[in-house]
């Protein structure tokens, strides 16, 4: 049997981009001397590339240049699926959406491009109901430009992992979808109640 099962793979680029836009916080992995360097950053998708910004003191910054290889993961919703939600006899499972990308990373040294990119990212993250606009003349923005590096990742490999009970009958797939929505809303509330 081929793994992962084909029905859990989604090669539709539009679906993958939709996940990236809905869940822009990425896990970025560089491997240096057989050791992974891992950073979590929001990334914006533009024309086959991912655009991001990294603190100059982050040790991974040194490898965000020269067309180095990089792996990027995006995490969509996930939850345990109890057999109790199905209309047919099933075993417990876990549903999730994950995106695995590979690419080449290059530093962008242009300060004007960095500034505009920070403004663009803020606009994107503020949508759909923006309450804040990052002013290009904001003195705090200018003061911080020296501490941030802009980079872009040219995506060379796309892989969507959409494990959503596709191997079940339609009514059970719908029940799993509803459970994914319910469980994510409830787990966020419970988690925040426990830590806040």
Image (cartoon, helix red, strand yellow):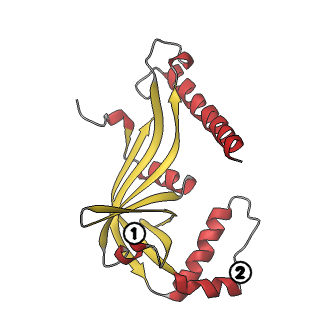
- Is residue 164 at all visible to an observer of this figure? no
The disc, 2 or 1, on the residue closer to the chain's N-terminal end is 2
Horizontally, is 67 left or right of 20 in the view?
Answer: left
Q: Secondary structure at mark 1?
A: strand
Q: Would you identify the image quadrant in which residue 124 lies?
A: bottom right
Instruction: Tell me if mark 1 has few (under 14), some (14-19) or many (20+) residues whose alpha carbon lies within 10 angstroms of its own.
Output: many
Quick one: 19 or 39, which is closer to the camera? 39
Q: Residue at x 44, y 22 (%)?
A: 168
**Viewer-proximal residue, 86 or 79?**
79
Asked if residue 186 can be seen in this view, the reply is yes
Q: Which residue is mark 2?
A: 135
Q: Position of residue 108 (x, y in %)?
A: 43, 81
x and y, in percent, of residue 102 in the image: 33, 60
Q: Position of residue 72 (x, y in %)?
A: 40, 59
Relative image position of residue 61 (x, y in whole percent): 41, 75
Q: CA distance from mark 2 to mark 1?
A: 26 Å
Q: Nearer the viewer, residue 48 or 95?
A: 95
**Point 70% across, 87% down: residue:** 139
Tell me whether circle 2 and circle 1 mark residues in contact (CB < 8 Å).
Answer: no
The N terminus appears in which quarter of the rendering?
top left
| Residue farthest to the front, as pictured | 195
Snapshot quadrant of residue 187: top right
Label 1 sits on residue: 153
């Amino acid at each position: 049997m081929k793994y992962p099962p084909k029905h859990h793979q989604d090669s539709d680029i539009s679906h993958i981009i939709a996940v990236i836009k809905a869940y822009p916080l990425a896990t970025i992995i560089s491997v240096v001397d057989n050791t992974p360097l891992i950073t979590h950053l929001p990334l914006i998708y533009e024309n086959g590339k991912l655009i991001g910004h990294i603190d100059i003191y982050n040790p991974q910054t040194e490898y965000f240049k020269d067309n180095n290889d990089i792996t990027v993961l995006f995490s969509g919703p996930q939850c345990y699926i109890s057999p109790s939600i199905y209309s047919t006899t099933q075993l417990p499972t876990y549903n999730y959406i994950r995106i695995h990308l590979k690419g080449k990373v290059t530093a962008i040294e242009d300060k004007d491009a960095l500034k505009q990119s920070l403004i663009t990212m803020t606009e994107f993250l503020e949508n759909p109901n923006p309450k804040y606009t990052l002013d290009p003349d904001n003195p705090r923005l200018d003061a911080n430009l020296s501490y941030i590096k802009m980079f872009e990742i040219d995506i060379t490999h796309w892989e969507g992992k959409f494990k959503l009970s596709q191997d079940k009958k339609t009514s059970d797939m719908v029940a799993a979808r509803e459970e994914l929505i319910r469980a994510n809303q409830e787990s966020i509330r419970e988690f925040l109640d426990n830590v806040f």
